[in-house]
Amino acid sequence: MSEPLFLGLDLSTQQLKVLLITEKAIVVHELAVGYDRDLPRYGTTNGTIRGPGDGQVTSPVAMWVEALDLILQRMKDADVDFARIRAVSGAGQQHGSIYWAKTGEDVLASLDASKTLLSQLNPHAFSIHDSPIWQDSSTTRECRELEEIIGGPQALADLTGSRAYERFTGTQIKKIRRERPDEYERTSRISLVSSFLPSLFLGFVAPIEVSDASGMNLMDVASCKWDERLLQACGGPELKAKIGPEPVPGGTVLGRVASWWVERWGFRPDCLVTPCTGDNPATMVALSTPGDAVLSLGTSTTFLLAIAPSDTPPARFTTSHLLAHPTTVGAHIAMLCYKNGSLAREKVRNEHANGDWAHFNELVAATPPGNNGYWGLYFPLPEIIPPNVVGNFYFKSKDGVTAPAPVETLPGIAHPRAILESQLLSIRARVAAVLQQDAPRLRRLVLTGGASTNPTIRQLSADLFGIPAYVAEDTSEAAATGGALLARYAWWLSSGGAAGSFEKMRASDAERMKLVAEPNEEITRIYDGLVETYTLCENFVVETRK
Protein backbone atom coordinates (compact mmCIF):
# COMPACT_ATOMS: atom_id res chain seq x y z
CA MET A 1 0.00 0.00 0.00
CA SER A 2 1.31 3.47 -0.90
CA GLU A 3 2.34 5.67 2.00
CA PRO A 4 -0.38 8.15 3.04
CA LEU A 5 0.02 11.80 2.11
CA PHE A 6 -1.46 14.87 3.79
CA LEU A 7 -2.35 18.01 1.88
CA GLY A 8 -1.80 21.50 3.26
CA LEU A 9 -2.91 24.60 1.37
CA ASP A 10 -2.04 28.22 2.08
CA LEU A 11 -4.32 30.80 0.49
CA SER A 12 -2.09 33.79 1.15
CA THR A 13 -2.10 37.39 -0.01
CA GLN A 14 0.08 36.96 -3.08
CA GLN A 15 -0.22 33.28 -3.97
CA LEU A 16 -1.89 29.95 -3.34
CA LYS A 17 0.55 27.29 -2.19
CA VAL A 18 0.11 23.55 -1.73
CA LEU A 19 2.39 21.20 0.12
CA LEU A 20 2.23 17.44 0.66
CA ILE A 21 3.85 15.59 3.56
CA THR A 22 4.21 11.95 4.47
CA GLU A 23 3.18 10.29 7.72
CA LYS A 24 6.69 11.14 8.99
CA ALA A 25 6.17 14.82 8.13
CA ILE A 26 8.60 14.75 5.20
CA VAL A 27 7.75 17.27 2.49
CA VAL A 28 7.40 15.53 -0.88
CA HIS A 29 5.67 18.13 -3.09
CA GLU A 30 5.43 21.93 -3.16
CA LEU A 31 3.62 23.98 -5.80
CA ALA A 32 2.33 27.54 -6.05
CA VAL A 33 0.15 29.80 -8.17
CA GLY A 34 1.08 33.48 -8.06
CA TYR A 35 -1.94 35.69 -8.61
CA ASP A 36 -0.20 38.58 -10.39
CA ARG A 37 1.95 36.28 -12.52
CA ASP A 38 -0.40 33.41 -13.30
CA LEU A 39 -3.78 35.17 -13.22
CA PRO A 40 -3.03 38.67 -14.56
CA ARG A 41 -6.55 39.21 -15.90
CA TYR A 42 -7.73 40.09 -12.39
CA GLY A 43 -5.52 43.18 -12.39
CA THR A 44 -4.07 42.70 -8.91
CA THR A 45 -0.85 44.15 -7.54
CA ASN A 46 0.73 41.85 -4.97
CA GLY A 47 -2.57 39.93 -5.00
CA THR A 48 -4.70 42.91 -4.04
CA ILE A 49 -6.80 45.74 -5.45
CA ARG A 50 -6.70 49.14 -3.74
CA GLY A 51 -9.72 51.43 -3.63
CA PRO A 52 -12.00 52.82 -4.68
CA GLY A 53 -12.48 54.10 -1.13
CA ASP A 54 -9.72 55.44 1.12
CA GLY A 55 -7.92 52.56 2.82
CA GLN A 56 -9.98 49.96 0.99
CA VAL A 57 -8.08 46.80 -0.01
CA THR A 58 -9.76 43.74 -1.49
CA SER A 59 -9.04 40.60 -3.50
CA PRO A 60 -11.35 39.00 -6.09
CA VAL A 61 -12.97 35.83 -4.77
CA ALA A 62 -13.05 34.44 -8.32
CA MET A 63 -9.25 34.75 -8.48
CA TRP A 64 -8.88 32.52 -5.44
CA VAL A 65 -11.25 29.94 -6.92
CA GLU A 66 -9.44 29.94 -10.26
CA ALA A 67 -6.10 29.63 -8.45
CA LEU A 68 -7.37 26.41 -6.86
CA ASP A 69 -8.47 25.06 -10.26
CA LEU A 70 -5.05 25.89 -11.68
CA ILE A 71 -3.00 24.43 -8.86
CA LEU A 72 -4.95 21.16 -8.99
CA GLN A 73 -4.04 20.88 -12.67
CA ARG A 74 -0.40 21.58 -11.83
CA MET A 75 -0.51 18.87 -9.17
CA LYS A 76 -1.83 16.44 -11.76
CA ASP A 77 0.85 17.51 -14.24
CA ALA A 78 3.44 16.89 -11.52
CA ASP A 79 2.12 13.30 -11.18
CA VAL A 80 0.70 13.77 -7.70
CA ASP A 81 -1.32 10.67 -6.80
CA PHE A 82 -4.47 12.21 -5.33
CA ALA A 83 -5.62 8.78 -4.11
CA ARG A 84 -2.76 8.79 -1.57
CA ILE A 85 -4.09 11.93 0.14
CA ARG A 86 -5.81 10.86 3.37
CA ALA A 87 -6.70 14.28 4.78
CA VAL A 88 -6.81 17.94 3.76
CA SER A 89 -6.31 21.10 5.82
CA GLY A 90 -4.54 24.39 5.36
CA ALA A 91 -4.17 28.04 6.20
CA GLY A 92 -5.58 31.32 4.98
CA GLN A 93 -4.56 34.93 5.28
CA GLN A 94 -6.20 36.07 8.48
CA HIS A 95 -9.29 38.33 8.72
CA GLY A 96 -10.35 38.20 5.05
CA SER A 97 -14.00 37.31 4.49
CA ILE A 98 -16.11 35.67 1.75
CA TYR A 99 -19.84 36.29 1.37
CA TRP A 100 -21.94 33.38 0.09
CA ALA A 101 -25.17 34.18 -1.76
CA LYS A 102 -28.35 32.37 -0.83
CA THR A 103 -27.88 30.20 -3.94
CA GLY A 104 -24.22 29.60 -3.10
CA GLU A 105 -24.74 26.66 -0.82
CA ASP A 106 -26.94 24.94 -3.41
CA VAL A 107 -24.28 25.45 -6.08
CA LEU A 108 -21.59 24.16 -3.73
CA ALA A 109 -23.59 21.03 -2.93
CA SER A 110 -24.18 20.08 -6.58
CA LEU A 111 -20.82 20.57 -8.30
CA ASP A 112 -20.51 18.91 -11.70
CA ALA A 113 -17.24 16.97 -12.06
CA SER A 114 -17.05 17.79 -15.77
CA LYS A 115 -16.72 21.52 -15.01
CA THR A 116 -14.21 23.66 -13.12
CA LEU A 117 -14.93 25.24 -9.77
CA LEU A 118 -14.71 28.70 -11.30
CA SER A 119 -17.26 28.05 -14.03
CA GLN A 120 -19.79 26.85 -11.48
CA LEU A 121 -19.22 29.16 -8.52
CA ASN A 122 -18.57 32.48 -10.22
CA PRO A 123 -20.52 34.73 -10.12
CA HIS A 124 -23.73 33.26 -8.70
CA ALA A 125 -22.38 31.62 -5.53
CA PHE A 126 -21.26 34.93 -3.99
CA SER A 127 -23.18 37.98 -2.89
CA ILE A 128 -20.02 40.10 -2.77
CA HIS A 129 -17.19 39.53 -5.24
CA ASP A 130 -14.48 41.75 -3.76
CA SER A 131 -13.37 40.27 -0.46
CA PRO A 132 -11.99 42.71 2.13
CA ILE A 133 -8.59 41.47 3.32
CA TRP A 134 -6.17 42.11 6.15
CA GLN A 135 -4.54 45.14 4.50
CA ASP A 136 -7.81 47.08 4.55
CA SER A 137 -7.86 50.11 6.84
CA SER A 138 -11.21 51.64 5.92
CA THR A 139 -13.24 50.74 9.01
CA THR A 140 -11.97 53.21 11.63
CA ARG A 141 -15.51 54.49 12.23
CA GLU A 142 -16.76 50.96 12.89
CA CYS A 143 -13.83 50.25 15.22
CA ARG A 144 -14.59 53.22 17.42
CA GLU A 145 -18.30 52.37 17.48
CA LEU A 146 -17.60 48.77 18.50
CA GLU A 147 -15.22 49.79 21.28
CA GLU A 148 -17.76 52.27 22.61
CA ILE A 149 -20.46 49.60 22.76
CA ILE A 150 -18.22 47.20 24.73
CA GLY A 151 -16.67 49.81 27.04
CA GLY A 152 -13.43 50.89 25.37
CA PRO A 153 -10.38 49.37 23.66
CA GLN A 154 -9.11 47.53 26.75
CA ALA A 155 -12.53 46.07 27.52
CA LEU A 156 -12.76 44.73 23.98
CA ALA A 157 -9.22 43.34 24.22
CA ASP A 158 -10.11 41.65 27.52
CA LEU A 159 -13.11 40.01 25.85
CA THR A 160 -11.79 39.09 22.39
CA GLY A 161 -8.00 39.17 22.78
CA SER A 162 -7.63 42.35 20.71
CA ARG A 163 -8.89 45.91 20.60
CA ALA A 164 -10.88 46.84 17.50
CA TYR A 165 -8.70 46.70 14.40
CA GLU A 166 -9.67 47.96 10.97
CA ARG A 167 -8.68 44.67 9.32
CA PHE A 168 -10.65 42.45 11.72
CA THR A 169 -13.65 40.71 10.25
CA GLY A 170 -16.29 42.00 12.66
CA THR A 171 -15.81 45.64 11.72
CA GLN A 172 -15.57 44.71 8.03
CA ILE A 173 -18.98 43.03 8.31
CA LYS A 174 -20.32 46.07 10.18
CA LYS A 175 -19.20 48.38 7.37
CA ILE A 176 -20.67 46.16 4.65
CA ARG A 177 -23.99 46.01 6.50
CA ARG A 178 -24.04 49.83 6.67
CA GLU A 179 -22.80 50.67 3.17
CA ARG A 180 -24.06 47.70 1.14
CA PRO A 181 -27.28 46.62 2.87
CA ASP A 182 -28.77 44.88 -0.18
CA GLU A 183 -25.70 42.70 -0.66
CA TYR A 184 -25.57 41.98 3.06
CA GLU A 185 -29.21 40.93 3.00
CA ARG A 186 -28.48 38.59 0.06
CA THR A 187 -25.66 36.97 2.07
CA SER A 188 -26.55 33.54 3.40
CA ARG A 189 -23.24 32.63 5.07
CA ILE A 190 -19.93 34.35 5.78
CA SER A 191 -16.63 32.47 5.64
CA LEU A 192 -13.13 33.46 6.60
CA VAL A 193 -10.48 32.73 3.98
CA SER A 194 -9.48 29.77 6.15
CA SER A 195 -13.01 28.31 6.31
CA PHE A 196 -13.59 29.05 2.61
CA LEU A 197 -11.02 26.40 1.63
CA PRO A 198 -12.60 23.41 3.46
CA SER A 199 -16.02 24.56 2.25
CA LEU A 200 -14.89 23.95 -1.34
CA PHE A 201 -13.67 20.47 -0.42
CA LEU A 202 -16.78 19.54 1.59
CA GLY A 203 -19.50 20.83 -0.69
CA PHE A 204 -21.05 22.84 2.14
CA VAL A 205 -20.02 25.89 4.15
CA ALA A 206 -17.54 24.84 6.83
CA PRO A 207 -17.52 26.18 10.40
CA ILE A 208 -14.80 28.66 11.36
CA GLU A 209 -11.75 27.36 13.21
CA VAL A 210 -11.18 28.58 16.76
CA SER A 211 -7.76 30.22 16.38
CA ASP A 212 -8.68 32.13 13.24
CA ALA A 213 -11.99 33.14 14.85
CA SER A 214 -9.84 35.00 17.39
CA GLY A 215 -9.03 37.55 14.68
CA MET A 216 -12.61 38.72 14.14
CA ASN A 217 -13.50 40.72 17.29
CA LEU A 218 -16.56 38.45 17.50
CA MET A 219 -15.44 35.57 19.77
CA ASP A 220 -14.89 35.44 23.52
CA VAL A 221 -11.25 34.33 23.57
CA ALA A 222 -11.66 32.66 26.99
CA SER A 223 -14.71 30.51 26.19
CA CYS A 224 -14.05 30.26 22.42
CA LYS A 225 -17.74 30.95 21.77
CA TRP A 226 -19.34 33.68 19.70
CA ASP A 227 -20.30 36.67 21.84
CA GLU A 228 -23.93 37.71 21.36
CA ARG A 229 -23.26 41.42 21.99
CA LEU A 230 -20.51 41.50 19.38
CA LEU A 231 -22.59 39.65 16.80
CA GLN A 232 -25.45 42.06 17.33
CA ALA A 233 -23.18 45.10 17.20
CA CYS A 234 -21.44 44.09 13.98
CA GLY A 235 -24.13 42.34 11.97
CA GLY A 236 -27.48 42.66 13.67
CA PRO A 237 -29.66 39.76 14.79
CA GLU A 238 -29.11 37.97 11.47
CA LEU A 239 -25.32 37.65 11.84
CA LYS A 240 -25.50 34.61 14.11
CA ALA A 241 -27.05 32.57 11.31
CA LYS A 242 -24.69 34.01 8.69
CA ILE A 243 -21.57 33.29 10.74
CA GLY A 244 -22.60 29.68 11.42
CA PRO A 245 -21.99 27.29 14.31
CA GLU A 246 -19.57 27.81 17.18
CA PRO A 247 -15.85 27.76 16.26
CA VAL A 248 -14.19 24.34 16.05
CA PRO A 249 -10.66 23.30 17.09
CA GLY A 250 -7.99 22.04 14.73
CA GLY A 251 -7.98 18.29 14.23
CA THR A 252 -11.78 18.11 14.05
CA VAL A 253 -13.09 15.95 11.22
CA LEU A 254 -15.62 18.07 9.32
CA GLY A 255 -16.49 15.37 6.80
CA ARG A 256 -15.19 13.70 3.65
CA VAL A 257 -14.39 15.29 0.30
CA ALA A 258 -17.39 15.92 -1.94
CA SER A 259 -17.89 13.72 -5.00
CA TRP A 260 -16.50 16.44 -7.32
CA TRP A 261 -13.03 15.81 -5.90
CA VAL A 262 -13.33 12.05 -6.29
CA GLU A 263 -14.72 12.08 -9.82
CA ARG A 264 -12.64 14.91 -11.30
CA TRP A 265 -9.27 14.44 -9.60
CA GLY A 266 -9.26 10.94 -8.13
CA PHE A 267 -9.33 11.71 -4.41
CA ARG A 268 -10.29 8.86 -2.12
CA PRO A 269 -13.98 8.97 -1.10
CA ASP A 270 -12.86 8.67 2.54
CA CYS A 271 -10.34 11.54 2.36
CA LEU A 272 -10.92 13.64 5.50
CA VAL A 273 -11.58 17.37 5.40
CA THR A 274 -10.49 19.22 8.52
CA PRO A 275 -10.60 22.89 9.60
CA CYS A 276 -8.05 25.26 8.13
CA THR A 277 -6.64 27.93 10.41
CA GLY A 278 -5.09 31.34 9.92
CA ASP A 279 -1.64 31.61 8.39
CA ASN A 280 -0.08 32.78 11.66
CA PRO A 281 -1.50 29.99 13.85
CA ALA A 282 -0.53 27.50 11.12
CA THR A 283 3.02 28.82 11.27
CA MET A 284 3.06 28.17 15.03
CA VAL A 285 1.79 24.64 14.46
CA ALA A 286 4.58 23.98 11.97
CA LEU A 287 7.54 25.54 13.71
CA SER A 288 7.10 26.16 17.41
CA THR A 289 7.98 24.09 20.43
CA PRO A 290 7.98 25.40 24.05
CA GLY A 291 10.63 28.08 24.48
CA ASP A 292 10.50 29.22 20.86
CA ALA A 293 9.50 32.52 19.37
CA VAL A 294 8.49 32.61 15.72
CA LEU A 295 9.29 35.61 13.54
CA SER A 296 7.42 35.50 10.24
CA LEU A 297 9.00 37.80 7.66
CA GLY A 298 6.44 37.73 4.87
CA THR A 299 4.13 40.34 3.37
CA SER A 300 3.38 41.22 6.98
CA THR A 301 5.88 40.95 9.82
CA THR A 302 4.52 38.83 12.65
CA PHE A 303 6.00 37.78 16.00
CA LEU A 304 4.39 34.79 17.72
CA LEU A 305 4.69 33.20 21.16
CA ALA A 306 2.88 30.12 22.44
CA ILE A 307 1.33 30.44 25.92
CA ALA A 308 0.67 27.18 27.77
CA PRO A 309 -2.64 26.50 29.57
CA SER A 310 -2.66 28.14 33.00
CA ASP A 311 -5.00 28.86 35.88
CA THR A 312 -4.09 32.52 35.42
CA PRO A 313 -5.59 33.98 32.25
CA PRO A 314 -3.00 35.53 29.90
CA ALA A 315 -2.79 39.31 29.94
CA ARG A 316 -4.50 41.19 27.11
CA PHE A 317 -3.12 44.38 25.61
CA THR A 318 -4.33 46.97 23.13
CA THR A 319 -1.07 46.74 21.14
CA SER A 320 -0.91 42.97 20.69
CA HIS A 321 -3.24 40.05 20.03
CA LEU A 322 -4.20 36.98 22.01
CA LEU A 323 -5.47 34.04 19.95
CA ALA A 324 -6.86 30.68 20.98
CA HIS A 325 -4.39 27.92 20.14
CA PRO A 326 -5.47 25.76 17.17
CA THR A 327 -4.65 22.37 18.72
CA THR A 328 -4.36 22.75 22.51
CA VAL A 329 -7.50 23.59 24.49
CA GLY A 330 -6.79 26.33 27.02
CA ALA A 331 -3.54 27.38 25.35
CA HIS A 332 -3.08 30.65 23.50
CA ILE A 333 -0.84 32.44 21.03
CA ALA A 334 0.39 35.96 21.70
CA MET A 335 0.95 37.88 18.47
CA LEU A 336 2.38 41.17 17.29
CA CYS A 337 1.45 41.96 13.70
CA TYR A 338 2.76 44.66 11.37
CA LYS A 339 1.29 45.49 7.96
CA ASN A 340 4.52 46.97 6.57
CA GLY A 341 6.69 43.89 6.22
CA SER A 342 8.28 42.72 2.99
CA LEU A 343 6.70 45.39 0.81
CA ALA A 344 8.29 48.13 2.93
CA ARG A 345 11.68 46.37 2.85
CA GLU A 346 11.42 45.93 -0.91
CA LYS A 347 10.59 49.62 -1.33
CA VAL A 348 13.77 50.57 0.53
CA ARG A 349 15.74 48.03 -1.51
CA ASN A 350 14.39 49.47 -4.76
CA GLU A 351 14.97 53.11 -3.82
CA HIS A 352 18.32 52.81 -2.05
CA ALA A 353 19.97 49.54 -3.18
CA ASN A 354 19.28 49.48 -6.93
CA GLY A 355 16.58 46.85 -6.43
CA ASP A 356 19.23 44.28 -5.51
CA TRP A 357 19.23 42.31 -2.25
CA ALA A 358 22.98 41.62 -2.47
CA HIS A 359 23.66 45.36 -2.60
CA PHE A 360 21.11 45.92 0.19
CA ASN A 361 23.05 43.47 2.36
CA GLU A 362 26.35 45.16 1.51
CA LEU A 363 24.95 48.50 2.67
CA VAL A 364 23.79 46.95 5.95
CA ALA A 365 27.28 45.48 6.46
CA ALA A 366 28.86 48.87 5.74
CA THR A 367 27.10 50.48 8.72
CA PRO A 368 27.53 49.54 12.40
CA PRO A 369 24.81 48.37 14.80
CA GLY A 370 22.96 51.52 15.79
CA ASN A 371 23.44 52.93 12.28
CA ASN A 372 25.64 55.83 13.44
CA GLY A 373 22.63 57.34 15.20
CA TYR A 374 20.40 57.39 12.10
CA TRP A 375 16.84 56.14 12.49
CA GLY A 376 14.16 55.50 9.91
CA LEU A 377 10.56 54.34 10.41
CA TYR A 378 8.90 53.26 7.15
CA PHE A 379 5.13 52.94 6.76
CA PRO A 380 4.08 52.91 3.09
CA LEU A 381 0.75 51.40 4.20
CA PRO A 382 -1.34 52.51 7.21
CA GLU A 383 0.31 50.58 10.03
CA ILE A 384 -1.19 48.36 12.72
CA ILE A 385 1.53 49.05 15.33
CA PRO A 386 1.59 52.02 15.84
CA PRO A 387 -1.99 52.34 14.59
CA ASN A 388 -2.77 54.01 11.25
CA VAL A 389 0.60 55.75 10.88
CA VAL A 390 1.55 56.37 7.23
CA GLY A 391 4.77 57.74 5.72
CA ASN A 392 8.51 57.72 6.31
CA PHE A 393 10.00 59.36 9.41
CA TYR A 394 13.71 60.05 9.93
CA PHE A 395 15.71 60.90 13.05
CA LYS A 396 19.29 61.47 14.15
CA SER A 397 20.77 61.12 17.62
CA LYS A 398 24.22 62.57 18.24
CA ASP A 399 25.78 59.48 19.74
CA GLY A 400 23.18 56.87 18.82
CA VAL A 401 21.79 56.85 22.37
CA THR A 402 20.71 60.40 23.20
CA ALA A 403 17.21 61.61 22.38
CA PRO A 404 16.79 61.62 18.60
CA ALA A 405 15.78 64.73 16.64
CA PRO A 406 13.68 64.59 13.45
CA VAL A 407 15.55 65.19 10.18
CA GLU A 408 14.43 65.60 6.58
CA THR A 409 16.25 62.58 5.21
CA LEU A 410 19.03 60.05 5.83
CA PRO A 411 22.22 59.31 3.93
CA GLY A 412 21.43 56.75 1.24
CA ILE A 413 23.72 54.16 2.84
CA ALA A 414 21.75 54.33 6.12
CA HIS A 415 18.31 53.26 4.85
CA PRO A 416 18.78 49.46 4.60
CA ARG A 417 19.98 49.08 8.17
CA ALA A 418 17.46 51.65 9.37
CA ILE A 419 14.44 49.69 8.16
CA LEU A 420 15.68 46.40 9.58
CA GLU A 421 16.56 47.89 12.96
CA SER A 422 13.32 49.85 13.30
CA GLN A 423 11.10 46.90 12.30
CA LEU A 424 12.81 44.52 14.72
CA LEU A 425 13.23 47.00 17.59
CA SER A 426 9.49 47.70 17.48
CA ILE A 427 8.96 44.02 18.28
CA ARG A 428 11.78 43.86 20.83
CA ALA A 429 10.28 46.84 22.68
CA ARG A 430 7.03 44.92 23.20
CA VAL A 431 8.16 41.35 23.87
CA ALA A 432 8.53 41.68 27.63
CA ALA A 433 4.89 42.73 27.99
CA VAL A 434 3.47 39.73 26.11
CA LEU A 435 5.61 37.14 27.89
CA GLN A 436 4.09 35.58 30.99
CA GLN A 437 5.83 36.68 34.19
CA ASP A 438 6.94 33.14 35.02
CA ALA A 439 7.86 32.25 31.45
CA PRO A 440 11.33 30.75 30.95
CA ARG A 441 13.83 32.63 28.81
CA LEU A 442 13.30 32.19 25.09
CA ARG A 443 15.77 29.64 23.77
CA ARG A 444 15.55 30.16 20.01
CA LEU A 445 14.09 32.40 17.34
CA VAL A 446 12.50 30.51 14.45
CA LEU A 447 12.46 32.50 11.22
CA THR A 448 10.05 31.93 8.38
CA GLY A 449 8.67 33.80 5.37
CA GLY A 450 10.48 35.05 2.29
CA ALA A 451 13.05 37.20 4.11
CA SER A 452 14.09 34.28 6.32
CA THR A 453 16.43 33.18 3.51
CA ASN A 454 18.43 36.44 3.69
CA PRO A 455 21.67 35.83 5.66
CA THR A 456 21.98 39.48 6.72
CA ILE A 457 18.46 39.56 8.12
CA ARG A 458 19.07 36.23 9.87
CA GLN A 459 22.16 37.54 11.65
CA LEU A 460 20.68 40.92 12.56
CA SER A 461 17.61 39.17 14.02
CA ALA A 462 19.77 36.89 16.19
CA ASP A 463 21.89 39.82 17.37
CA LEU A 464 18.96 42.11 18.13
CA PHE A 465 16.93 39.56 20.09
CA GLY A 466 19.99 37.93 21.65
CA ILE A 467 18.96 34.35 20.87
CA PRO A 468 20.02 31.86 18.15
CA ALA A 469 18.08 31.99 14.89
CA TYR A 470 16.81 28.85 13.17
CA VAL A 471 14.94 27.99 9.98
CA ALA A 472 13.11 24.85 8.88
CA GLU A 473 15.42 22.81 6.66
CA ASP A 474 12.87 21.26 4.33
CA THR A 475 10.68 24.25 3.39
CA SER A 476 10.19 27.95 3.98
CA GLU A 477 6.42 27.52 3.54
CA ALA A 478 5.52 27.29 7.21
CA ALA A 479 1.79 28.05 6.88
CA ALA A 480 1.21 25.32 4.29
CA THR A 481 3.31 22.93 6.38
CA GLY A 482 1.19 23.72 9.41
CA GLY A 483 -1.91 23.00 7.34
CA ALA A 484 -0.53 19.64 6.25
CA LEU A 485 0.30 18.79 9.87
CA LEU A 486 -3.26 19.68 10.94
CA ALA A 487 -4.55 17.32 8.25
CA ARG A 488 -2.26 14.59 9.52
CA TYR A 489 -3.38 15.31 13.11
CA ALA A 490 -7.06 14.78 12.25
CA TRP A 491 -6.22 11.54 10.44
CA TRP A 492 -4.04 10.40 13.37
CA LEU A 493 -6.82 11.09 15.86
CA SER A 494 -9.39 9.27 13.74
CA SER A 495 -7.01 6.33 13.34
CA GLY A 496 -6.64 5.59 17.03
CA GLY A 497 -4.77 8.54 18.51
CA ALA A 498 -7.94 9.93 20.09
CA ALA A 499 -6.41 10.25 23.55
CA GLY A 500 -3.23 11.89 22.30
CA SER A 501 -2.14 15.45 21.82
CA PHE A 502 -0.69 17.17 18.78
CA GLU A 503 2.66 17.19 20.58
CA LYS A 504 2.44 13.43 21.11
CA MET A 505 1.82 12.91 17.40
CA ARG A 506 4.87 15.03 16.56
CA ALA A 507 7.14 13.42 19.18
CA SER A 508 8.47 10.86 16.70
CA ASP A 509 9.11 13.42 13.94
CA ALA A 510 12.74 14.14 13.20
CA GLU A 511 13.90 17.62 14.17
CA ARG A 512 14.41 19.57 10.95
CA MET A 513 15.51 22.93 12.29
CA LYS A 514 18.79 24.40 11.10
CA LEU A 515 20.82 26.89 13.13
CA VAL A 516 21.55 29.85 10.82
CA ALA A 517 22.81 32.59 13.14
CA GLU A 518 24.29 32.82 16.64
CA PRO A 519 23.94 36.15 18.46
CA ASN A 520 27.00 38.30 19.04
CA GLU A 521 26.76 39.24 22.73
CA GLU A 522 28.56 42.55 22.27
CA ILE A 523 26.14 43.60 19.52
CA THR A 524 23.15 42.40 21.56
CA ARG A 525 24.22 44.71 24.38
CA ILE A 526 24.25 47.61 21.91
CA TYR A 527 20.68 46.82 20.92
CA ASP A 528 19.70 46.47 24.58
CA GLY A 529 20.57 50.14 24.92
CA LEU A 530 18.71 51.20 21.78
CA VAL A 531 15.22 49.96 22.68
CA GLU A 532 14.39 53.14 24.57
CA THR A 533 15.76 55.35 21.78
CA TYR A 534 13.61 53.56 19.22
CA THR A 535 10.59 54.02 21.49
CA LEU A 536 11.24 57.77 21.62
CA CYS A 537 11.21 57.88 17.80
CA GLU A 538 7.95 55.96 17.61
CA ASN A 539 6.32 58.05 20.30
CA PHE A 540 7.29 61.23 18.45
CA VAL A 541 5.66 59.90 15.26
CA VAL A 542 2.46 59.00 17.12
CA GLU A 543 2.28 62.36 18.91
CA THR A 544 2.77 64.39 15.74
CA ARG A 545 -0.19 62.63 14.14
CA LYS A 546 -2.66 63.57 16.88
Image: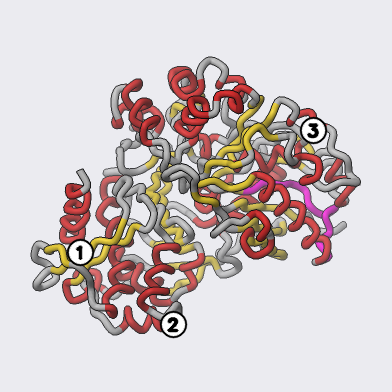
Alpha-carbon span between mark 1 and mark 3: 58 Å
SS at badge 1 = helix
Q: Is residue 112 visible?
A: yes
Name the residue carrying label 1.
528
For residue 318: magenta?
A: no
Identify the residue shown where x is 79% and y is 38%.
256
Q: Residues within 10 Å of mark 1 (few under 14, many from 20)?
A: some
Query: Between residues 376 and 272, which one lies in front from this camera angle?
Result: 376
SS at badge 2 = helix
Q: Quadrant of the C terminus?
A: top left
Name the residue carrying label 2.
358
Q: Position of residue 80 (x, y in %)?
A: 81, 61
Q: Position of residue 145 (x, y in %)?
A: 35, 26
Q: Amino acid at mark 3?
A: Val
| Dot label at residue 107 | 3
Magenta residues, as a range?
A: 79-90
Q: Are marks 2 and 3 in contact (CB under 8 Å)?
A: no
Alpha-carbon span between mark 2 and mark 3: 50 Å
Vertical placement of residue 229 versus 387, above or below: above
Q: How many marks?
A: 3
**Which callout, 2 or 1, points to the residue nearer the camera?**
2
Identify the residue shown where x is 65% and y is 54%.
42
Q: Quadrant of the N terminus?
A: bottom right
